Image: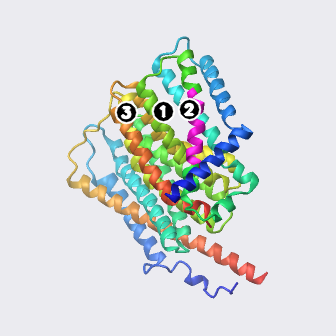
Amino acid sequence: MSAPAATIGAVGRTSRITLPALAATSLVLVTTAIVFVFFVAPTDANQGFSQRIFYFHVSIAITAYACFAGAAWQAFRLLWKRDPLADLKSYVCVHQGVIFGTLVLITGSIWAKISWGRWWLWSSDQLVLFLVLFLFYCAYFMLRFSLDPGPQRANLSAVYALFGVVLIPVSFAAIRLAKDIIHPVVFTLHGPNFGGWILVTYCISQVALLVLAYTLYRVELAGKQLDGRIRELREVLA
Amino acid sequence: MRYFRDVGALARKDLLLELRARDTLPAMVLFVAAVFVVFHFALPESPSRLETVGLLWVAILFTALLGLGRAFVPEREQRTLDGLVLAPCDRSAIWLAKSLATLAFLAAAEVVALPLYAIFFHRVGGATIAAVVLADIGICAVGTFLGAMAVATRARDLLLPLLFLPLAIPIVVGAVGASVVDSPGRYLGFLALYDALFAVVCWASFEYVVAE
């Protein structure tokens, strides 16, 4: 094995945007989003203050989808182009996706408790879908950690991550179908018109969470790459 | 044509093995019968059709899981998977043959299970049988694929249910829906769509599961 020539500084510099700049941007955006959500957006006439959690809940859900899509995209790149870094990228994407997915479940539960007085509602499509996805992607970790690092682990993880993007629409259709047999009553939210400050606030919090997720992704990726580099150096020195 | 000859030969091998050793099918049949008895005691007195249909699908799913867990055990114990991978045939033929063999076992177990269900609980309608056929295809296609994954890991048998159940939720929705509603066309169509979609994904990506 040749000695790894790269220095620590080179790790994580895979993109033109540096990590500190990214971190600062996400800090500014998240702060702006919080200010907008709590002070600028009008209070909902029907649901009151608690409706504000939706700005985060929906944004987090979309961010989680973006993470899962990113994981599948990197998995595809691994299988197609044999990009050696794609395995790690795909794993980090799934990890971030599961973190954001857990947040969706938590914010959704809080919303359900305030609105309907129960912590869990099977009639909320998105929540049930996220529960299925949560179970699916937790199994991804079980699969990954029960394999030794190497090409086989990369392949199996990638194939499973690709199954995820097929499962998302299929499960969503299934959950919609299941409603007809299990839940005759469908909750629909007739909120106010989705425009003006509400739309602006939503867009800001959406962008803020996407940038935050990307920052966390880059931090974790850099950390994982550093771990790998240190392990290589140890092997060389041993 | 050669491809299907390979698939046929591989599937015949699995069926022959089972015919001689008989370790999967009797276990599946016994299991599903035992589950029905457990259900009888777990359910309230004279349960409705809706309740028992749900449990029928739980029983079928877990029985399938039992068979799927055994699917790649001979390959692991005899270390024949490397030989199969090195054989001059398309790798997806291994998956297809294994799925067909598992499908045969599951269908055989259900030939016993469905009449038993009819005797113990409620009549089995035509829509339920159609749903069983379509669901079996999906269960075996996806389950065999995941079984090949699970057998490569350290956790092995422990992992298969964890990998499989989240993917099987749409099958349960389609199958239960088809069994309980009056016009099951939509649910059967959904099951067929699931089968087609996941069969293509499994067929295309099995190569990466067995090859390093």
* C-alpha separation, residue under disc 2 versus residue under disc 1: 9 Å
Q: Nearer the viewer, residue B37 or A133?
A: B37
Tally of marks = 3
* C-alpha separation, residue under disc 2 versus residue under disc 3: 22 Å
Residue B26 placement, left or right of A13 = right
**Residue drawn at point x = 62 percent, y = 47 percent:** B12
Q: State the SS at label 1.
A: helix
**Residue drawn at point x = 55 percent, y = 15 percent:** B119
Q: State the SS at label 3.
A: helix
Magenta span: B98-111
**Residue drawn at point x = 56 percent, y = 32 percent:** B60
| Disc 2 and disc 1 on one polypeptide chain | yes
Chain containing the residue with disc 1: B
**Residue drawn at point x = 41 percent, y = 27 percent:** B127
Residue B132 marker: 1
Amino acid type, mark 2:
Ile
* C-alpha separation, residue under disc 1 versus residue under disc 3: 21 Å
User: Where in the figure is residue A73, as x and y percent of width and height?
Assistant: 44, 65
Q: Is residue B83 above or below residue A56?
A: below
Residue A179 marker: 3
User: Where in the figure is residue B140, as x and y percent of width and height?
Assistant: 54, 43
Amino acid type, mark 1:
Val
Q: Nearer the viewer, residue A109 or A53?
A: A109
User: Where in the figure is residue A227, as x and y percent of width and height?
Assistant: 64, 73
Q: Which callout, 2 or 3, points to the residue nearer the camera?
A: 2
Residue B60 marker: 2
| Disc 1 and disc 3 on one polypeptide chain | no
Residue A145: say if magenta. no
